[in-house]
Image: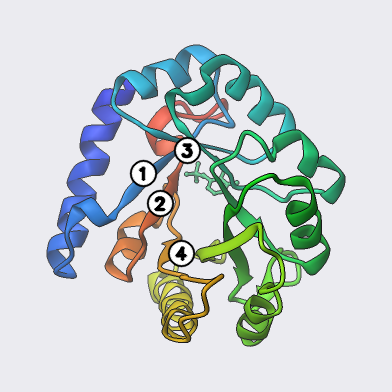
Amino acid sequence: MVLVAENLTKIQSTIQTACDKSKRDQNEVTIIGVTKYVTIERTEEAIQATIENLGENRLEGFQEKYNHFKDRVKWHFIGTLQSRKVKDVIDKVDFIHSLDRKSLAKEIDKRSARPIDCFIQVNVSGEQSKHGIALDDVESFTSSLRSYSNIRVVGLMTMAPHTDDDEVIRQTFQSLREKRDQIRNKNEPHAPCSFLSMGMSNDYGIAIEEGATHIRIGSKLVGSKTSEV
Ligand SMILES: *Cc1c(COP(=O)(O)O)cnc(C)c1O
């Protein structure tokens, strides 16, 4: 298996190229190392290679990694979160990327002792199989969260559709950015909405060109069980 540090060097160079192309500063881009496929040892290697943000998509994986690494990194919960599991992660997470329904917001608000930085998950493409709020409903959904004092909408999150067509992917990310701009411009105190969580191993270059502030990289960074990078 290739060292995480070598993978990271390649990723950083792609980030630099995308930032140059779009005249952005690469300090605006945070890499979230998605460790759901890999062991504690491989995760340790990522931290040694200077990864400061980790993402897990399932409660079990999150707890395993969290219990080991605790506050050595910032924790991002990136997967679908069942309301009844909120209590198990809420004191540990720094960010939740998958806020996609009112009942979940209500549970987070109730269970947390502090405001939680949340991304609203958006289903830009409208694919039936995908979680997330429809693009047209994101604005009203965001406004409807204002009474929950423990929810801070820091940004929007999406996953691009499964396609080889870069233009379709780019359009998805562009739509998310436009929606982010709209919500940010409303200056609602509970929704600064300055961040864009978009881009994974196969599309993070495009995502950065379109404004991503948080890219979620698993297989190309740490490898995966099925395809070791
Ligand atoms: C697994 C996962 C990723 C990372 O996927 P890769 O393609 O391996 O980079 C990113 N975001 C979410 C929500 C995931 O579940």
**Left or right placement of residue 176 versus residue 139 in this view:** left
Q: Secondary structure at mark 3?
A: loop
Tag 2: amino acid: Ile
Instruction: Please tell me how many numbered marks the rendered image carries.
Output: 4
Give the residue at mark 2.
215
Q: Is residue 120 visible?
A: yes
The reply to whether the C-beta atoms of the residues labelled 4 and 1 are less than 8 Å apart is no
Residue pointed to by mark 1: 31
Query: For the residues marked 4 and 2, what is the alpha-carbon distance in whole angstroms?
Result: 19 Å
Q: Residue at x 44, y 79 (%)?
A: 184
Place of residue 195 in the rendered image (x, y in percent of width and height, measured from the top left): 42, 64
Question: Which residue is under mark 3?
Answer: 218
Instruction: Label 2: state its secondary structure.
Output: strand
Please rate how many residues cluster around mark 3, counting C-alpha atoms within 10 Å: few if below 14, some from 14 to 19, many from 20.
many
The residue located at (17%, 45%) in the rendering is 13
- Looking at the rendered image, the disc whose residue lies closer to the viewer, 2 or 3, is 2
Q: Nearer the viewer, residue 22 or 82?
A: 82
Q: Pointers 2 and 1 in contact (CB under 8 A)?
A: yes
**Callout 3–callout 1 Cβ contact below 8 Å:** no
Query: Real-space Cα distance between discs 4 and 1?
Result: 23 Å
N-terminal of the pair, mark 4 or mark 1, is: 1
Residue 106 in picture, x, y percent from top left: 80, 61
Q: CA distance from mark 2 to mark 1?
A: 5 Å
Helix, strand or loop at mark 4 = loop
Instruction: Please tell me the numbered disc located at residue 94.
Output: none
- Please give the residue where the numbered disc 4 appears in the rendered image: 164
